[in-house]
Image (tube, rainbow, N blue to C red):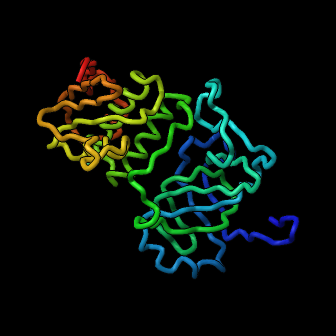
Amino acid sequence: MTNETGWQLRPIGVVRSEAKERKQLPPLGLPATIELFPEYEPGLLHLEKHTHLWVLVWLHAAERDLLQVVPRGVRAEDPDALHGVFAVRSPVRPNPIGLTLTRIERVEGCRIHVARLDFIDGTPVIDLKPYFVSRDMVYSAANAQIGRPASRENLRESLWEQALNFHGEPCAELALAVRIIEHFRWEVLEGRDPATVVVSAPRQRGCLVDGLMGMTRVSLGRRTLDLIEGDSVILEHEGVRHRYDLRPQSGDDAGAVLGADQATLFEWRQVSGA
Ligand SMILES: [Zn+2]
C-alpha cells in the first residue's frame, strides 16, 4: 500500500469470512471476524463500551480508474443507474477504501466477531472506529433512491436491516412491518422508494410502529406518523391511501413471518381520496 509520494498505509489486521470471492457476498454481507495483528491488540481497550463499529478496509482487488459505476444490487437497465463513485459506496474508486458499519457480537483477544461484513476473506483492515450515537446518528437524514433493487429478496434484506437497526432486536411484529413496506415498495411502487409517505399505525403495537419508523423515517413530530386504534396500517402516498388489514398471528418467530405467504399476513387495498 505505498503511493507515488511514498507514504504508506499499514494494515492492522485482516477480515475472516466464509466468502472467498465477491460474488459469494450478499449485498449486506455475512457474519465475519476481524483478526487484528497481535501488536495492535492494546488498541482494543474499552471497545466493549460500544455496540457498533465502523470498519475501514483496503479493497486491493478493486478497479481504480473509473469515476462512474452502476452500483451493485440495483437494476442496471434503468436509465439513471449510473452514479459517480463519490455518490455511492462502490469499491471502485481512486483510493479503494471500504467503509462498513457493523454490530460487534463479541471480542476474544485480538479477534472481533461482527454481525456482518461485506468484505471477502483476506481483505486488509486499515482502521476501526466506534459508531457514536451522539455524532453519527441523524434520524432525519434522507437519501434519494440510488436505484431500484435488483430483486425482491434484496429489498426485503435491506428493509429488515433498517428495521433491526431501529428496534434493536428481531421479533415477529418487526418482521410484519418489513413485509408491509416490502409489499408497498415492490408491488405498489414497482421498486421505487417514496420520497414522502405518511403512516398511520396501531398505537398498541409498539414493535410494529418501531419497524415502520425505522424503514420510512416517519415521526410524530413531523406529523408523518399517526397512531390509531384498530389493527390496520395505512400508508398515504401522493394522495392515495393504502390500507393493510392485519391478520391475527400466532407465535413470535421473526423468521417465519419474513418467509410467510403474504396473504396470511395482511389484506391490502387501495382507499381512494384522503
Ligand atoms: Zn419487538
Question: In the displayed structure, does residue 244 sit left or right of residue 56?
Answer: left
Give the x, y percent position of residue 215.
38, 42
Q: Measured along the vertical axis of the image, is residue 59 above or below residue 175?
A: below
Q: Residue at x 66, y 73 (%)?
A: 37
In the rendered image, which quarter contains the C terminus? top left
Q: Residue at x 71, y 59 (%)?
A: 58
Give the x, y percent position of residue 40.
63, 78
Give the x, y percent position of residue 139.
39, 53
Can residue 129 be seen in this snapshot?
yes
Depth order, front residue of 78/31: 78
Can residue 208 be seen in this snapshot?
no
Q: Residue at x 77, y 50 (%)?
A: 61
Q: Measured along the vertical axis of the image, is residue 77 above or below residue 135?
A: above
Question: In the displayed structure, does residue 259 sit left or right of residue 47?
Answer: left
Furthest residue to the left?
Answer: 229
Question: In the displayed structure, does residue 57 sit left or right of residue 183?
Answer: right
* Location of residue 273 (image quadrant): top left
Question: In the displayed structure, does residue 201 sit left or right of residue 176?
Answer: left
In the rendered image, which quarter contains the N terminus? bottom right
Q: How many marks?
A: 0
Give the x, y percent position of residue 41.
59, 78
* Location of residue 147 (image quadrant): top right
Q: Measured along the vertical axis of the image, is residue 263 above or below residue 8?
A: above
Depth order, front residue of 138/127: 138
